[in-house]
Amino acid sequence: MMNGLRSWFISIGGHGIDLQLGILASLATAGIVAIVNRFRQLLNKRSRIRKFFGKSSQNFMLFTGQIYFNPSNHRYMAAGDIKSVLCLTLNIHSIFKLKKIPHKFSDEAVISQDLRENIITIGGPKFNTVTRVMIDKYNQMIPSFPAKFNGNSIYINAVNARGETFQKQFCLKRHNGTLIDDYGLLIRGINPFDDTNSSLSWVIAGSGSNGVIASVDQMSHFIHGFQVRFRRLYKFLYSGAIGIVVVKANFFEGEYVSSNPVFYAVYKPSNRPFLKKKFNWEFRNLDI
């Protein structure tokens, strides 16, 4: 037995150089993999930050809607928007690593100051005045802007350069008291209140609270998802000056379960004067 162990150790000793080289090669490979993964993480983080606010400053303000209760007249966030805000802030924290997210209620906004920077406004126009003035400003700035709110309904009236049109009203619906339809509106584009066109804005709204959640869901896909899988979402939200997505909230027994886009539009203004009067919109209707 002793002779067997001695011969085994001799065998190991004879191959010591090969063993050392193998260990060094393994360590080098592990080091290279770690460096590549770290580099990839940094690139992904940079890409995700740019998906939020492009090349502009990463400073931003988050605006939420509010309601007041008597007799104290205390201000609260609209209950239906709380879940959406929570999901959104988790996305923001995962990218910007902020200890505290800059936030204001919409009735605190000073248009001449607060709305000229990068902003995110979440919630429908009923409770969030910033959402309302942003969509109104887009429609004022671009007469062909296709998205409006009609009460709590999202109204789309789109026309492209070829004269093709699409008109539809997306609204919340119930059947015997159970939710069956709700829609969200997601807008990413140049901030219409910034005359320098250097800041961006996100409008995250909906016909109802589940429509807002569906919009946040699609925003998360856009920020974190692979471009191949979400290439259409990426194209329409990132390739032009303004991107618009109408999102359908899907329900099971009245509970929200998922979301899917039903309408895309992107605005690509032309630098050539003779084209400026044309409708520089491209859109895609999936709600068939």
Image (cartoon, grey):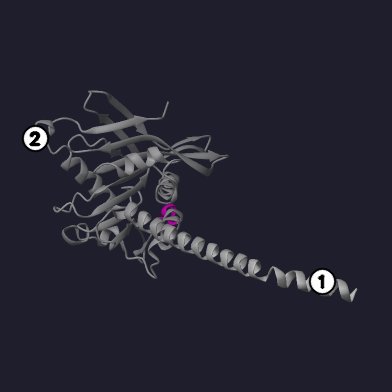
On the question of residue 237 being in view, the answer is yes
Furthest residue toward top = 163
Residue 74: horizontal and vertical position, in percent? Answer: 35, 65
Q: In this view, does 68 lie above or below 124?
A: below
Residue at the (82%, 71%) spot, across then down: 7
Q: Which residue carries the number 2 mark?
A: 273
Pick whichever of labels 2 and 1 is earlier in the sequence: 1
Element type where label 2 sits in the image? helix
Residue at the (53%, 39%) spot, across then down: 251
Left/right placement of residue 46 relative to residue 23 reads: left
Q: Which residue carries the number 1 mark?
A: 7
Label number found at residue 172: none
Q: What residue type is labelled 2?
A: Pro
Left/right placement of residue 186 relative to residue 84 reads: left
Residue 218: horizontal and vertical position, in percent? Answer: 42, 45
Q: In this view, does 182 lie above or below 19?
A: above
Q: Give the range drawn in magenta.
A: 78-82
Left/right placement of residue 146 relative to residue 284 reads: left
Name the dominant secondary structure of the magenta segment: helix
Q: In front here: 6 or 103? A: 6
Image quarter in which the C terminus is found: top left
